[in-house]
């Protein structure tokens, strides 16, 4: 147990000038539970950490009194290690992230990466929905919140809860540019180059995903000729991004995306 967490909760509660009962009511727990946290005899459930942080207007890192820069470095290292196995060995990716959560309970970034691993697994839909709701309500990171909304809508769709999909998606703002895109245009040197590479990989993924949507919708309408046309375009896009042609733009995530689309076309 982190020896600073209970003291930090007490400190923040007194700064806000509220009682244990008020905090307990907000979190849906008993005031005795809050008392145990503050007395260091019990630890809040991991799922409550984002909500506690949100209530006090601090980050989850602040709750644990970690050095922010060092913590972020370690967290992104954990997520990077897990991402390597996201496609090839999801169970291993999940294990890495869950071990990371033991070090950094309730961390939004690790939880968000865990959501991406759980996404699409019908057997994990209840856990996915619960975790999405926790992050949506508790995170102060807009990127994490919107990704959780996206995954929540996708899970509703996969589990036949179609009436909940549109209201969930409507909570995500429509943005016609990305930070990476603007960084690629306005920064210089390696900063611009790296942003462009990352954005290119995302654009590649989105383009192929939309081509497959167009293919599938054409087939639903009975227009096989149009479906084949979109599939041929997909194959052309994949070929254009093959390693031998664009070695300087290649990275491991892009290679994994290409392989996943090749598997779909096979």
Image (cartoon, rainbow, N blue to C red):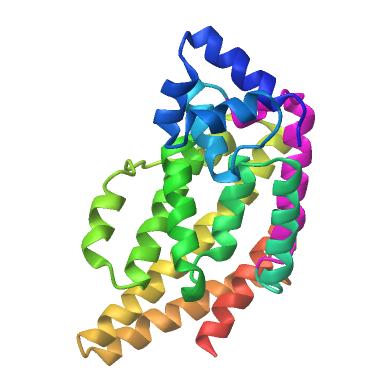
Q: Nearer the viewer, residue 252 or 145?
A: 145
In x, y percent, where is residue 144? 51, 42
In x, y percent, where is residue 160? 29, 73
Magenta highlight range: 59-86
Q: Looking at the image, which residue is at 38% across and 63% down?
A: 154
Specify the quadrant of the image occupied by residue 229: bottom left
Q: Nearer the viewer, residue 80 or 92?
A: 92
Specify the quadrant of the image occupied by residue 103: top right
Q: Looking at the image, which residue is at 51% across and 77% down?
A: 236
Q: Is residue 181 above or below residue 8?
A: below
In the image, farthest residue toward the front:
32
Q: Is residue 31 magenta?
A: no
Q: Is residue 227 above or below residue 90?
A: below
Q: Looking at the image, which residue is at 23% across and 88% down?
A: 223
In x, y percent, where is residue 25? 40, 29
Q: Is residue 138 above or below residue 98?
A: above
The majority secondary structure of the magenta stretch comes to helix
Q: Looking at the image, which residue is at 21% across and 90% down?
A: 222
53 relative position to 248: left or right: left
Q: Nearer the viewer, residue 215 or 48?
A: 48
Where does the N terminus fall, quadrant-wise?
Answer: top right
Q: Is residue 266 above or below residue 105?
A: below
Q: Is residue 75 magenta?
A: yes
């Amino acid at each position: 147990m982190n020896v600073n967490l209970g003291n930090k909760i007490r400190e923040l509660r007194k700064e806000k000038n509220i009682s244990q009962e008020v905090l307990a009511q907000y979190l849906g727990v008993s005031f005795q539970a809050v008392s145990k946290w503050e007395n260091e005899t019990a630890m809040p459930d991991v799922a409550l950490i984002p909500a506690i942080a949100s209530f006090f207007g601090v980050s989850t890192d602040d709750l644990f009194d970690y050095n922010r820069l060092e913590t972020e470095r370690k967290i992104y290292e954990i997520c990077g290690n897990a991402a390597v196995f996201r496609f090839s060995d999801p169970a291993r990716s999940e294990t890495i992230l869950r071990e990371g959560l033991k070090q950094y309970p309730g961390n939004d970034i690790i939880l968000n990466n865990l959501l991406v691993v759980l996404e699409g697994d019908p057997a994990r839909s209840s856990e996915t929905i619960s975790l999405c709701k926790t992050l949506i309500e508790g995170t102060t990171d807009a990127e994490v919140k919107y990704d959780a909304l996206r995954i929540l809508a996708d899970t509703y769709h996969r589990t036949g809860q179609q009436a909940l999909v549109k209201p969930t998606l409507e909570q995500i703002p429509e943005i016609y540019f990305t930070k990476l895109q603007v960084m690629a245009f306005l920064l210089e040197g390696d900063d611009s180059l790296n942003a462009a590479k990352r954005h290119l990989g995302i654009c590649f993924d989105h383009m192929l995903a939309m081509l497959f949507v167009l293919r599938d919708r054409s087939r639903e309408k009975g227009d096989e000729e149009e479906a084949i046309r979109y599939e041929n375009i997909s194959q052309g896009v994949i070929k254009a991004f093959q390693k031998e042609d664009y070695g300087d733009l290649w990275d491991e995530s892009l290679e994994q995306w290409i392989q996943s689309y090749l598997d779909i076309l096979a």
